[in-house]
């Protein structure tokens, strides 16, 4: 309940422009790797394997590490929530001189074409039924999108029902 209240408060701060990032220069690869490693034991409780890969060891960029952490924790918890036991989640980072692309891919239930466009809106969930297996408020991905946009980045979902989901966010390098 407290998390829901905090999320609603954060939405208000985002929409009114009160929420400002604490931007400085950080190694994005290290942030992503640390957050990924922090959820490995949680995933193991559900017999889910998390694999991390990157094409570079360092990518210094101007960002707010707590916002990036929140984005990653939300996306990884969604991946764990919607992935059945004995499956995998992959966290891949591909960087070049201008941007970093972080792809969180799971072997879960996937998202239908019609739901892919709406799930980044406030209070929207793909499964709206009262008998759904997974709980949620439908505001996590809205916050994810907002925090990524505060970094002048973008986020998209590639998915096929029953074949998993790939959430890809791109952040421009700012030096």
Image: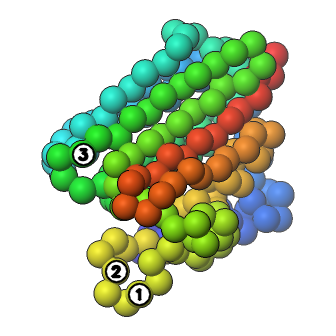
Q: Pointers 3 and 1 in contact (CB under 8 A)? A: no
Q: Position of residue 98 (x, y in %)?
A: 78, 19
Q: Secondary structure at mark 3?
A: loop
Farthest residue toward the bottom? 130
- How far apart are the two marked residues, 3 and 1, measured between alpha carbons? 25 Å
Residue at mark 1: 129
Q: Is residue 70 visible from the viewing direction of this image?
A: no
Residue at mark 3: 87
Residue at mark 2: 132
At x 64%, y 19%, the residue is 95
Q: How many neighbours does mark 1 have within 10 angstroms: few (below 14), some (14-19), or many (20 or more)?
A: few
Left or right of residue 147, residue 81 in this image: left
Q: Position of residue 31 (x, y in %)?
A: 51, 26
Q: Pointers 2 and 1 in contact (CB under 8 A)? A: yes
Q: Is residue 148 visible from the viewing direction of this image?
A: yes
- Residue 41, numbered label: none
At x 72%, y 68%, the residue is 12
Left or right of residue 48, residue 102 in this image: right
Q: How many neighbours does mark 3 have within 10 angstroms: few (below 14), some (14-19), or many (20 or more)?
A: some
Of labels 3 and 1, earlier in sequence is 3
The C terminus is located in which quarter? top right
- How far apart are the two marked residues, 2 and 1, measured between alpha carbons? 5 Å
Q: Secondary structure at mark 1?
A: loop
The N terminus is located in which quarter? bottom left
Q: Nearer the viewer, residue 154 or 64?
A: 154
Q: Position of residue 26 (x, y in %)?
A: 64, 19
Q: Nearer the viewer, residue 40 or 108?
A: 108
At x 19%, y 52%, the residue is 85
Q: Pointers 3 and 2 in contact (CB under 8 A)? A: no
């Amino acid at each position: 309940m407290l998390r829901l209240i905090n999320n609603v408060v954060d939405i208000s701060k985002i929409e009114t422009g009160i929420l400002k990032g604490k931007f400085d220069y950080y190694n994005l690869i290290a942030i992503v790797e640390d957050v990924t490693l922090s959820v490995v034991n949680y995933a193991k409780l559900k017999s889910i394997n998390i694999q991390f890969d990157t094409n570079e060891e360092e990518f210094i960029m101007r960002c707010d590490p707590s916002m990036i952490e929140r984005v990653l924790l939300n996306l990884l918890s969604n991946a764990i929530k919607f992935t059945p036991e004995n499956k995998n989640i992959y966290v891949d980072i591909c960087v070049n001189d201008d941007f970093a692309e972080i792809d969180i891919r799971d072997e879960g239930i996937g998202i239908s074409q019609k739901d892919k466009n709406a799930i980044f809106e406030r209070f929207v969930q793909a499964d709206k039924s009262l008998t759904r297996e997974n709980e949620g408020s439908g505001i996590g991905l809205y916050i994810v999108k907002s925090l990524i946009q505060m970094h002048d980045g973008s986020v998209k979902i590639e998915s096929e029902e029953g074949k998993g989901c790939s959430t890809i966010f791109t952040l421009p390098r700012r030096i």
